[in-house]
Image (cartoon, helix red, strand yellow):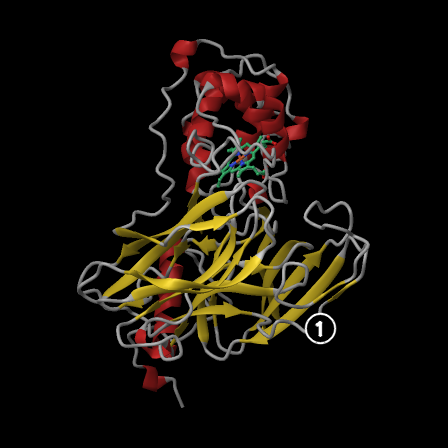
Amino acid sequence: MHQSNRTIINTAKLSQKVGSFLLFLSFMGAAQSLSAQEAIADPNVTFADVAPILYENCIQCHNPEGGAPMSLMDFETAKIYAPLIKHRTGIKDRMGAMPPWYHERDIGLQSFKGDMSLSNDEIAILAAWADAGAPLGDSELVPPAPDVPTGWTIEPDFIVRSGPITVGANEPDWWGIIDGAIEIPLDEDRYVKAVQVREVNDIGSSNLSGRHTVGGKYIIHHAAYTVIAPNSNIFQIAGEGGGIWPVHEVGRNEDRFDDETGPLIKAGSQIILPSVHLHSAGVEATAHLEFGFELFPPGFEPKYERVSVSIGNLGDGVDIDIPAGDGLQVLHTYSVLEKHTKIIAFEPHLHAPGERMCLEAIWGSHQETLSCVGYDHNWVRKYTFGTDAQPLLPKGTIVHMIGWMNNSESNSNIPDARNWQGSGNRSVANMFLELGLEVHLTDDEFVQEMEDRVKMLGATKSDYVLGCPLCLAGVPTPGAKPEDWEE
Ligand code: HEC
């Protein structure tokens, strides 16, 4: 398994003192298995050790202008929150964890783009600091706080905004089409590498309703959007590079497409919002959406024919049947890949009872877990695999999705656990599907991708390439003509 670069970089940044504290723990054989709860109070851990972790992983949201309830850019506030920081970072990969990123570190592929999770070492340092009473230590050693982050986790080439949307303090939920197209300022056709959608609103940290939850911070639960070319309409866009774009949902991170293929925006296109769900934040609030697009260079030609969205049970699952009070119900869905497929990103999609989802690939007698992630319906996350980890699955692979539902009082997202829940589109009904990204590959492309992967990983015959069942199976060498081995 590949150690993520992040862990290595972060550990290198630690001061000497903490280095020796961790060295001591590793000497005891404990550093990797240490949970935050077990961390030993070490009076030598000071804010100088903690600040870099907060700056790198938390202040993107925990800044005076960010979406989080408090800023973690200064010692005084961080100190007040130290016990809560220990608690929330110690949750690791389940609902409530901070940062909100839930991939499980002990199973499946481990390389992701934009991975914001903490390493076990970082979690241990935060816990040790809280247990020691959150000392400042030598203030000279504390690195200066960086500039307040912009909130963009991609590098947008341009940003467009929707019109203002207002929801009153006690209004019921609203669903529908938001009228008015958003002009895209492009005078040539361009392909998109990444897109990020953000809700910007006037709620701020002064929400007097006291709802320091995601629901009290945002009014747009989700917004499905699409990009339509000039003289087109929503029913004709599929072949024009439009199609359904990834849905914006509350708490959701950015979408990064395949490294060499992304959706097309034609010159003069517009964004439309055909399906939006608004809810009250407990105070009257006005918001707009900002769409940031990072583009491939002009003249770029996509390598693969198309980017498709989703695998798994797409039929809105008429069969979901979640008993009242059941804290551990496991659902399964199977789908067969009809083409060679490279999975770019995994995005579990469940509703309030959803607690966890795993993605498994079954190829002949070969069965492997690609990824398992926790789920929090308030913090929908997309997990984009690192370039060295995107599953390469041959056609005929059965993709098995497993969903864990918790419809009991132990799940704080459930309004009333005495209710049975079924399938449907509403927030009180359920879905069980996957909204990831994938590209389809021809035989030649598939063989080439596998060859590249084996080289990238430096894998030998005695290795095992997770997510690529045929990578080391002795397939014909690319470059040798495919007709040599096709019938
Ligand atoms: C992507 C944005 C984001 C990131 C990154 C993030 N947080 Fe948060 N955090 C939030 C939001 C929004 C809330 C309020 C909703 C909630 O409690 O889940 C919150 C809540 C919290 C709370 C609970 C506060 C309370 O009053 O109950 C703590 C503690 C916390 N975060 C610590 C951290 C730490 C430490 C990090 C980094 C290691 C971090 N967060 C990273 C957005 C973020």
The secondary structure type at the circle numbered 1 is: loop
Return the residue nearer the eye: 96 or 229: 229
Taking the image as four quarters, which one is ligand 1 found in?
top right
Return the residue nearer the eye: 68 or 115: 68
Return the residue nearer the eye: 461 or 322: 322
Residue 177 at x, y percent in the picture: 46, 65
Residue designated by label 1: 319
Q: Residues within 10 Å of mark 1 (few under 14, many from 20)?
A: few
Residue 352: image quadrant is bottom right
Asked whether, in this view, residue 354 is left or right of residue 305, the answer is: right
Q: Residue visible at 59% across and 50% down?
A: 171
Q: Give the residue at the far bottom of this rendering.
A: 487
Three-letter code, disc 1: Asp
Image quadrant containing the C terminus = bottom left
- In the displayed structure, 43 sits above or below 220; it is above
- In the displayed structure, 97 sits above or below 337; it is above
Return the residue nearer the eye: 447 or 259: 259
| Any part of residue 111 in sight | no
Residue 357 at x, y percent in the picture: 62, 57
